[in-house]
Amino acid sequence: MRHLILTIILVCSILLTSCNSLKVPKSMMDHKMSAVPVDVVPTNAEWKVPEHVNPSEKIPLSILIKDNSNQPITSFETVHEKKMHLFIISNDLSYFSHIHPKYKENGQFDFTGEFPAGGDYKLIAEFTPKGGGDSSVETHWLQVEGEPADFGPIVPDKKLTKKVNGKEVTLSFDQLQPNKILHMTFSIRDAKIHKPIKDLQPYLGAMGHAVAISADAEQYLHIHPMTTEENGPKVTFMTIFPEKGLYKIWGQFKHDGKVFTVPFVIEVH
Ligand SMILES: [Cu+2]
């Protein structure tokens, strides 16, 4: 009986882990078209968060990365210029932040969180223990005291063109079915003179980064462009949306030395 329960717990945690870390594996980016990350080092995480977190306060947070036998992992690959990429997202997907925790020692990374309002926030840490191929992902829900911001449920954008930081960005897809490889293209123009921008700069070792989160904040995809030779105006990403539904996508690009973030809500159907 005990064995059965242990087996069930083990199977559940494996399933949960694979759900949380769904993303495009390197093997697919190498055009081997596998949808399952094959080379992920199994990890555990211990999140150190204060008992009470208030909005608009700078909070010291940390994450300790351990291996399967609960020993700290002490060596990490540098991927896209950093040992860890961390995303903070509010459960209504209105808030997004991309930061880089500092590696201290003994598997521990420290970072500062600041949350705009009360409510639940998902912390998503992506890192690659030395020797791993695809990156590992650990997540944690953090509760911030006080009233949540009321933005209502997310709705798909009617127009996939947005203006941010003096740029006019259009998002397009070759198709939008779940579980099929698709191409997602950001076209970037100068909003004032309406000219295509051809001198984008690499940001963290790629011509752009895109993060997509499902409406329930369960599915997480961190995507990189297919090619890095061209500096715009089009940046194309290849990915797979695991299931039907709404996703919020944040594209991040660098121009004139400044990083800008452009959000879109799309429906996969
Ligand atoms: Cu990052």
Image: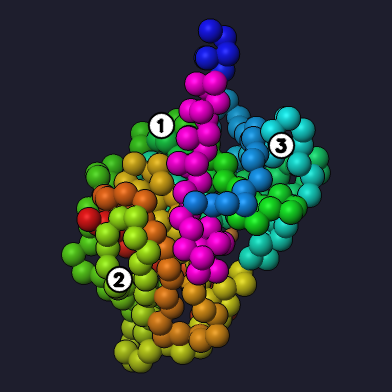
Q: Position of residue 156 (x, y in %)?
A: 23, 57
Indicate which disc, 1 or 2, sits on the residue closer to the N terminus: 1
Q: Which mark is nearer the camera, 3 or 1?
A: 3
The residue lying at 50 percent from left, 41 percent from top is 18
Badge 3 amino acid: Asp
The residue lying at 47 percent from left, 63 percent from top is 33
Residue corresponding to mark 3: 67
Vertical order, 2 against 139 (above or below): above
Indicate which disc, 3 or 1, sits on the residue closer to the N terminus: 3
Residue toward you, 246 or 90: 246
Question: In the rendered structure, which segment of residues is drawn in magenta?
Answer: 7-35
Q: Position of residue 3 (x, y in %)?
A: 58, 13
Badge 1 amino acid: Gly
Q: Characterize the local packing of mark 1: few (<14), some (14-19) or many (20 or more) Cα atoms within 10 angstroms.
A: few
Residue toward you, 233 or 5: 5
Was residue 124 drawn as part of the magenta stretch in this picture? no
Indicate which disc, 3 or 2, sits on the residue closer to the N terminus: 3
Where ligand 1 lies, by quadrant?
bottom right
Disc 1 to disc 2, C-alpha distance: 39 Å
Circle 3 sits in a helix, a strand or a loop, which is it?
Answer: loop
Q: Is residue 130 visible?
A: yes
Q: Is residue 94 visible?
A: no
Q: Position of residue 136 (x, y in %)?
A: 60, 48
Q: Residue furthest left?
A: 158
Left or right of 150, for residue 63: right
Q: Residue furthest top?
A: 1
**Which circle marks residue 146 in the picture?**
1
Residue toward you, 25 or 143: 25
Residue corresponding to mark 2: 173
